[in-house]
Amino acid sequence: MWSLKPYKSPPSICPGCREENPGFEEYIPTGIHILGKGACSGCGLEYYYNWPIGHGAHFPVSFDGNGIANYPPEAKQWFAIPLIDTIKKGREVACKIKRTVRKEFSEGLLLNCLDPCYGHVLWKLFNASFYRDITAPSGLIVLIPENFRWLVPDYAAEIWSVEAGLPDLNFKISSLPNFIKEACRSYGSLKLLPVDTHIDHTALDLQQFLPEAPFKLENFYRLPLCITVVWREDRFWLRSLSESWLSLVAAKYQVSWIRNWLLYRQRSKMIGVMSQIRKQIPGVLFKLTGLGTSGSFPDFVDDLRSARPDVDRERAWCQCYSKSHLIIGVHGSNMLIPTALSAGFIELLPKQKISFLSEDILMRHPPRFQTFLGRHLDIFAPTKLVARHAISILKDFKYLYHNTLAAP
Ligand SMILES: [Zn+2]
C-alpha cells in the first residue's frame, strides 16, 4: 500500500527514455490523482506521473508538461489529456474542504473517491465496504465531493468532503496539498487505499450506502404498480441520427434553442409512453425524478424533479425507486442508484455505449429474473416499443415468477 506517512511512493517509467525510476520524493495531490514529480535517473528529464490508485492502476500516465508523454492510447481523451492539461495550463480550483471526525484513530486509511464522473465517485466509494470491519488503531477516511457525503457509510471514521461541483474536479484543488499536510499531523500513519473501479456489485451490501432497501420481488403484485422515469437535461432520448447530431451541436456551441427543442421532444416521448401504458394498465402510478425542471407533465405524473443536487430530494428519490416496478431512463450513471433499488429497468442506450452495457446498472436478481426485468433498448427506440416492453414487464412477470419458483 502506498503511503503519505511514512512516505512510500511507487516507481514510474520515464516518458522520455523509458527508464524505470524508484519513487520520487515530491508528490502533489491534485484531487483525482496523487502525482509524483522528479528527475529521471537515466536521462535527467523532469516529469510527473500518476500513482497507481483507482484508474491510475490501469492507466499509467507520465509526462513532462512540454510535449513528452506516455500513456495507454485508450485512456487518452478521458483520462490522460485532462490530467496533462491540468498541470501544463495550471488549472486550479479553490474550494473548501470540510473535515468531519466521527471516531478517533491513529492509523489513517485514505479512500480517495474524487472524480469528475458521477458514476466513478460511486464505484470508488463502494470500495469502503472492504474496510467495514477495521478497528482502532486503524480508521477509514473517505475523501469525497460534498454532494456525495450522504452516501458515506456510518463505519467511516472520518470524512473529508470537498465543496466542489463535479466538473471542477477535472482541475487541481488548490487547497488540498495543505489540507492533507495539516491532517497528516493527527495520525501516526496515513496510507492510500487501492481503489477498484470495477467492483463486483453483486457481492456488495448496497444498504450500507443507500437509505432504502431494494424492491423485494415477492411484493411485485402486492404494491401498487409504479413506473419512475428518470429525467436529465444534458442527454436526450432521441428519435433519429439527425437529432443525435443536433444534440452534439447544442452541447458544443451552447445553442439553447436546440437544447430546448430536444427537451420538448424528449418530454413528449415520455408522455407518449406513459399514455400508452395507461391505456393498457389504467392504475399505474407514474413518478418523475432527476435533475432539471423544464416543461410540465400531465396531472397523473408525480413530478419530483429538482433544479439542482439536493440531499433531501435524493433521499426522497431513493424511497420512490425502492417502490418502483420499473425505471425508465436514458443511459448514464443517473441509472445507478435507481436500478440498485427498483425491481426492473428500461435503459435507452446509444451504439457507442454497447461496449459498456452493464456499467450503469446495479440491479441484482437471479439470472432469469434479471434478464426479464432489465431491458436495454436503442436510444432511438420508438415510444410504442418502449411502452410494449414496459407493459410486458408489468403484466407478464407474474407468469415467469410463479413458474420459476413453483415446486415440481
Ligand atoms: Zn529518462
Image: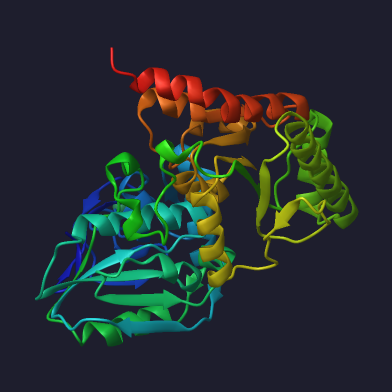
Q: Quadrant of residue 210?
A: bottom left
Looking at the image, which is closer to me, 8 or 158? Answer: 158
State which quarter of the image contains the C terminus: top left
Q: Quadrant of residue 71?
A: top left
Look at the image and tell me whether residue 45 can be seen.
no
Looking at the image, which is closer to me, 244 or 81? Answer: 244
Q: Residue furthest top?
A: 408
Residue 228 picture location, percent across and down: 63, 47
Residue 159 picture location, percent across and down: 33, 76
Residue 294 picture location, percent across and down: 80, 59
* In-image side of 284 versus 106 (left or right): right
* In-image side of 364 versus 85 (left or right): left
Look at the image and tell me whether residue 304 can be seen.
yes
**Could you tell me which residue is drawn at 67 percent across and 41 percent down?**
284
Q: Residue furthest left?
A: 137
**Could you tell me which residue is drawn at 55 percent across and 63 percent down?**
316
State which quarter of the image contains the N terminus: bottom left
**Could you tell me which residue is drawn at 49 percent across and 34 percent down?**
356
Residue 232 picture location, percent across and down: 68, 52
Q: Is residue 176 above or below residue 169?
A: below
Q: Is residue 216 above or below residue 41?
A: above
Q: Is residue 324 above or below residue 24?
A: above
Looking at the image, which is closer to me, 139 or 215? Answer: 215
